[in-house]
Amino acid sequence: MTEWVKITRSFDAPIADVWDMWTDPAKFQSWYGPMGFSVPVAEMDVTVGGTRKINMAMETPERKMSMWFTGLYKVVDAPNRLVYTESMCDPNGNVISPKDMGMPEGTPEVTEVTVELSEQDGKTVMVMTHAGVPAGTPGEGGWNMAFDKLGGLLGAA
């Protein structure tokens, strides 16, 4: 099992629009998370060294779930490259160890998301790599569902 998820998608949208979907909190809330999840909180200071705190939530008659993530922006090179760290946290932004969240032994406390955008034939190609999240896990499935939602908003190519 590879210790990173790498997903490539193409969108029928200008690169600036795809960049905005990753960096504008209101737009990020419109697509992020697996199907059935909403993003009630997206606090994003998209500057190098800036912090982010995201809440993904789902509520059905049978189940209620809320997950919080925090991190730091390491690279902000509009509109081509965005790199940020991600850790599970409590609602106040305090990092919670994966072990305390019931995750398997060896799950990293900090992972890193890299988003690379380029223009090809009038479309935007996005390559997202999430280092520290193994391929073939629910994390990869969640990303794919989120990108399906993103494609629905932008126009999948």
Image (tube, rainbow, N blue to C red):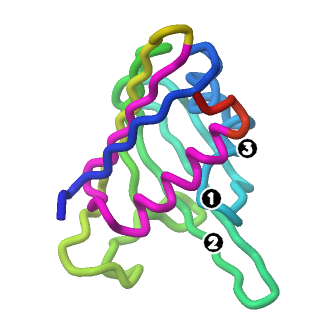
Q: Position of residue 122 (x, y in %)?
A: 55, 9
Q: Which residues are magenta?
A: 123-151
Q: Nearer the viewer, residue 8 or 138?
A: 8
Q: Which residue has dot 3 on it? A: 30
Question: Furthest residue to the right?
Answer: 61
Q: Which residue has dot 2 on it? A: 66
Question: Furthest residue to the bottom?
Answer: 62
**Disc 2 marks which amino acid?**
Ser
Q: Quick one: label 1, few (<14), some, or many (20+) residues within 10 Å?
A: many
Q: Position of residue 114 (x, y in %)?
A: 35, 35
**Disc 3 marks which amino acid?**
Ser
Earlier in the chain: of badge 3 and badge 2, it is 3
Label annotation for residue 55: 1
**What is the spatial separation of the Cα atoms under label 1 and label 3, in whole angstroms?**
13 Å
Q: Vertically, is 74 above or below 137? A: above
Could you tell me if the residues under marks 1 and 3 are in contact, i.e. CB atoms within 8 Å? no
Q: Vertically, is 120 above or below 61? A: above
Q: Does the magenta-highlighted stretch encompass residue 136?
A: yes
Q: Vertically, is 126 above or below 89? A: above
Q: Nearer the viewer, residue 157 or 107?
A: 157
Where disc 1 sits, the SS reads: strand
Nearer the viewer's eye, disc 3 or disc 2? 3
Q: Quick one: label 3, few (<14), some, or many (20+) residues within 10 Å?
A: some
Q: Position of residue 32 (x, y in %)?
A: 62, 48
**What is the spatial separation of the Cα atoms under label 2 and label 1, in whole angstroms?**
7 Å
**Disc 1 marks which amino acid?**
Asn
Residue placed at 38% from the left, 25% from the top?
116
Residue placed at 70% from the left, 86% from the top?
63
Q: Is residue 150 left or right of residue 141?
A: right
Where disc 3 sits, the SS reads: loop
Could you tell me if the residues under marks 2 and 1 are in contact, i.e. CB atoms within 8 Å? yes
Residue placed at 25% from the left, 52% from the top?
4
